[in-house]
Amino acid sequence: MHIVKDVTYVSDYKLRLSFDDGSVRLVDLAEELDGEIFEPLKDIGYFKKVRVNADLDTIVWDNGADMCPDFLYKLGLEVTQRTVAA
């Protein structure tokens, strides 16, 4: 299982996530915000309030929404020195 160590808002519904294995991945959640718990996240202002919960080892929002770190890892594109994130 992967562990999210850090999150940075990039743009739109894109987040830059750092994982416990040292990898950094760009995740676009625009198509993943389905369901009642994720509805508030469609407001960009609210989406930007994302944070890491160290007890859950993943990203969370104040309304209780979270996402499986393994799902985020698989969805994300690895960021390298040459990757342009935006």
Image: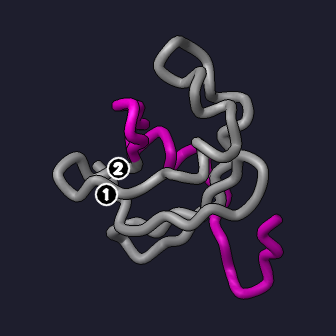
Image vertical order of residue 28 relative to residue 16, above or below: above
Residue at 47% across, 39% down: 71
- Quadrant of the frame with the C terminus: bottom right
Crowdedness of circle 1 by 10 Å Cα count: few (<14), some, many (20+)? many
Label at residue 3: 1
**Image position of 84 (left or right of 57):** right
Q: What amino acid type is highlighted by mark number 2?
A: Thr
Q: Nearer the viewer, mark 1 or mark 2?
A: 2
- Under tag 1, what secondary structure? loop
Residue 49 % position (x, y): 51, 52
Tags 1 and 2 in contact by the CB under 8 Å rule?
A: yes
Image vertical order of residue 8 relative to residue 45, above or below: below
Magenta extent: 60-86
Residue 52 % position (x, y): 36, 57
Label at residue 58: 2
Residue 51 % position (x, y): 41, 56
- Distance Cα–Cα, label 1 vs label 2: 6 Å
Residue 75 is covered by the magenta coloring: yes
Which secondary structure dominates the residues rendered in magenta?
A: loop
| Closer-to-camera residue (10/46) | 46
Residue 45 % position (x, y): 65, 46
**Image position of 14 (left or right of 51):** right
Q: What amino acid type is highlighted by mark number 1?
A: Ile
Of callouts 1 and 2, which one flags the residue occurring earlier in the amino acid sequence?
1
**Image position of 55 (left or right of 2):** left
